[in-house]
Image (spheres, grey):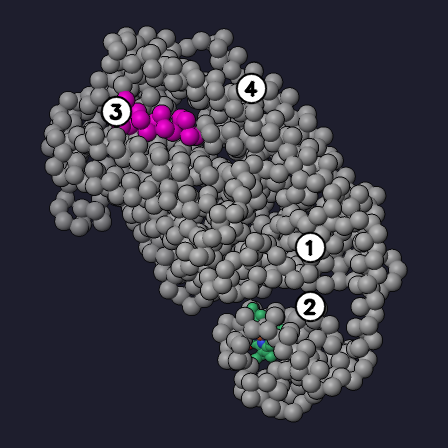
Amino acid sequence: MGDHYHGPATGVTRWLFTTNHKDIGTMYLWFSFAMFLLGGFFAMVIRAELFQPGMQLVEPAFFNQMTTLHGLIMVFGAIMPSFVGLANWLIPMMIGAPDMALPRMNNWSFWILPPAFLMLASTLFMEGGAPAFGWTFYAPLSTTYAPPSVTFFIFAIHILGVSSIMGSINIIATVMNMRAPGMTYMKMPLFVWTWLITAFLLVAVMPVLAGAVTMMLMDVHFGTSFFSAAGGGDPVLFQHIFWFFGHPEVYIIILPAFGVVSQIIPAFSRKPLFGYASMVYATASIAFLSFIVWAHHMYTVGMPVAGELFFMYATMLIAVPTGVKVFNWITTMWRGALSFETPMLFCIGFLVLFTLGGFTGLMLSIAPADFQYHDTYFVVAHFHYVMVAGAVFSMTAAVYYWLPKWCGRMYNESMGKAHFWISFIGFNITFFPQHFVGLAGMPRRIPDYALQFADFNMMSSIGAFIYGASQLLFLYNVVATIVAGERVSDEKVWDGAEGLEWTVPTPAPYHTFEEPPLVPKPAGTI
Amino acid sequence: MALLAPMATAQNQVNMSPGVTEIGADIFGLHMLIMWVCVVIGIAVFGVMFYSIYAHRKSKGHQASQFHESTKVEVAWTVVPFLILIAMAVPATSTLLEVYDNDEAELDILITGYQWKWKYEYLTDSGEPVSFFSNLATPQEEIYNTQTKGENYLLEVDEPLVIPVNTKVRFLITANDVIHSWWVPEIAVKRDAIPGFINEAWTRVHTEGLYRGQCTELCGAYHGFMPVEVHAVSRDEFDVWLAAKRGAAVVRSALATQTLSVDDLMAQGKGIYDRACLACHGAQGEGGVGNAIAGSQVVLGDLSGHFAAVAKGVSGTAMQAFGAQLDDVELAAVLTYQRNAFGNNTGDVVQPGDVTGMKNG
Ligand SMILES: [Cu+2]
């Protein structure tokens, strides 16, 4: 170590001015967890209102504000930043780089997030209330008919778009330029691969989202009519633009999750990942396909039949690379030496539930059937299976898996397992019955419902409270680990773990790989 | 707890309904087919996984094998799913083409979504046009839990859409304000209602009965409160109903040229106010979402200003244009009512003829 080696600064300035990827990663992770709790609290309000038929706790207008903010905060505040935090912590350590390529920008891309979300949350206290047009904010409900707070919403979206673009550029620059000698692309851990591809997706679509909200801003304040038929515009145009962003967005959320699972399953199977190359190609194909399927969210807008057919076929195709991934993970487990620590449990939970979400996704891709599914609770169930059991479960697995490396202390395994089982059961009690009410005809985004949906909704609400409570256990376990967990000092915390991040001391020092490491062996071999 | 009572009787449907149309049955068939395909694949995949979880545990002393590649398997599990998908795409395509076959309809109905109600217009070549609004009929007391909820809670309307069975009915669907979506699961029609554009959909119902649905596109605060109710009746019954509707329409347009009594106007006006204005302006005209009618300068002022507010709405606010939603008699009645109720006491009487006059400039 040279004499330029130094530890972190002290006090708040450490966090305000830091350019250290580990500090920034930590801030992203804590911030996203705070947003997860806030978005989760909104979900609890929603489920409490839906506990019984009849209006009980909130007014319909406020209910819509809750569904809108729940979606926005979970997608943009919880899931996306959490994976950026993980990328910050892990990508440099996985490719043998000393830090991210653009450390000052890294600081900035984090620090503009909290004000953006503060502004978004503050709309709740504005006249006319918070945005109440759903996280998909379809015009003209979000333009001509929007509350005044829509302007703040647009500003917030712009800021977090800028943050995402900066974060992605940083990841691309890091992965392309800072790999240790010998770390060729096809030796990179899958988590790095999935993030590289995700970063390209983000750079491609965040500007489209920015375009959509800018057009809204023009319609609201400057008399244009992009989305108003009365002035020669088209409300459906909004949906095309939104989903051109929105569909890749769901892969932006899930691809890093695939990466995490591809790291953890081999570790607890004590066996290399099966089909490394095909995993890379499958990820790239999914990313490509994600650009040509957007209108499957819009089967009922009255597209020409040729368009419907195109989007239906393209959407069905996504099942192929997704299937390849699931088969590869299971084959990785096959004839391994499996053990079931908390990270592995969450990954198996991911595998089962994400696959169920994939199945309902395939059902939804069938355009004529979607006429019955669209905008019902069937869709709500589907995307919570892929977003929560997909992204959130894998993120949770990641925290348990790498936490000992980060802080040099082991989490409490029984508490971790309890967290898994309570989450898993609570999640399914919440979302499985939603398939039923959806098929039986319950639309989404309604504050009150017909009596035949009552029993399943009550069940859903009970499940949601259980799932919500289990996250407090998670918080407790993580804090207890950091403060007083049992110390670990093995470089390889897990006997089956592979990769450069497991070659540095535990806990990972403030600076790692100031000298590039020797890259021992190709990924996919032992 | 008394409010929980009706739940015991409600059935917990868990699957899609095949409905009462051929297309609905086709869609149901597709849905079941793909579901079973998924179930079979799921059993195979999870079977392998759980076997591995059981048999290949470290705790049982299983030694990890180190294989990590096999082009053959990779090709197989790329190609086989692809073939399954093609097999599913075939019936899906043919059903979709059928859904889109809007030609040769025997009856056209224009459906317009409003915040938060539906308007139905029967488009026929001859005779007086028939059109009406269909509003939620569930009383506020049931919604706010002070009265026991009825069997069709939130799925009942004041005036249902009536269609004949065994007839190809085409729906032309549009909206007046924001995007709505008209859905009745049992007749397998869901189409977005988009302001400024007209979408087409069709149905041919083969069984008489009452079919219920809801708006399925978030359309603002009361999105959950704009149900659809379709009454499918025999051809004869439908003809009788349509003729009666037409007759009533003729009577109404005749009324528009008559001079009505103050009591009549006030009585009708109260009915319309309670149904269409009260939610925002308050039972005593005290205001709420909308401003107070009691003592309002607009209402107490010039009739033309009052008329403009009601007929054209106040743009950029929740006050909609009621000009197209209420006919001349109804407008006259509600204007008279607002000008004389809640202590406004202007003594003004607005006749349908006055409204017709103001409408024509
Ligand atoms: Cu609606």
- Image location of residue A313, percent across then percent down: 62, 29
- Image location of residue A241, percent across then percent down: 56, 46
Query: Of the residues shown, which amino acid type is indicated by label 2?
Result: Gln
Corner quadrant of residue B58: top left
Corner quadrant of residue A505: top left
Label 2, secondary structure: give it.
Answer: loop
Measured Cα–Cα span from mark 4 to mark 1: 40 Å
Q: Which of marks 4 and 3 is in front?
A: 3
**Residue at point 36%, 25% (across, down):** A348
Q: On what subunit does the disc labeled 3 rest?
A: A
Between residue B259 and residue A75, name the one nearer to us.
B259
Q: On what subunit does the disc labeled 2 rest?
A: B
Q: On what subunit does the disc labeled 1 rest?
A: B
Q: Can residue A59 be seen in the rendering of this structure?
A: yes
Packing grade of label 4 (10 A; few <14, some 14-19, many >=20) is: some
Measured Cα–Cα span from mark 2 to mark 4: 53 Å
Label 3, secondary structure: give it.
Answer: loop
The residue beneath circle 1 is B174
Label 1 beta carbon less than 8 Å to ligand 1 = no
Measured Cα–Cα span from mark 4 to mark 3: 32 Å
Q: In the visual, does B221 lie left or right of B177? A: left
Q: Which of marks 2 and 4 is in front?
A: 2
The circle on residue B81 is 4
The residue beneath circle 2 is B325
Measured Cα–Cα span from mark 1 to mark 3: 55 Å
Packing grade of label 3 (10 A; few <14, some 14-19, many >=20) is: some
The circle on residue A341 is 3
- Boundaries of the magenta span: A340-354
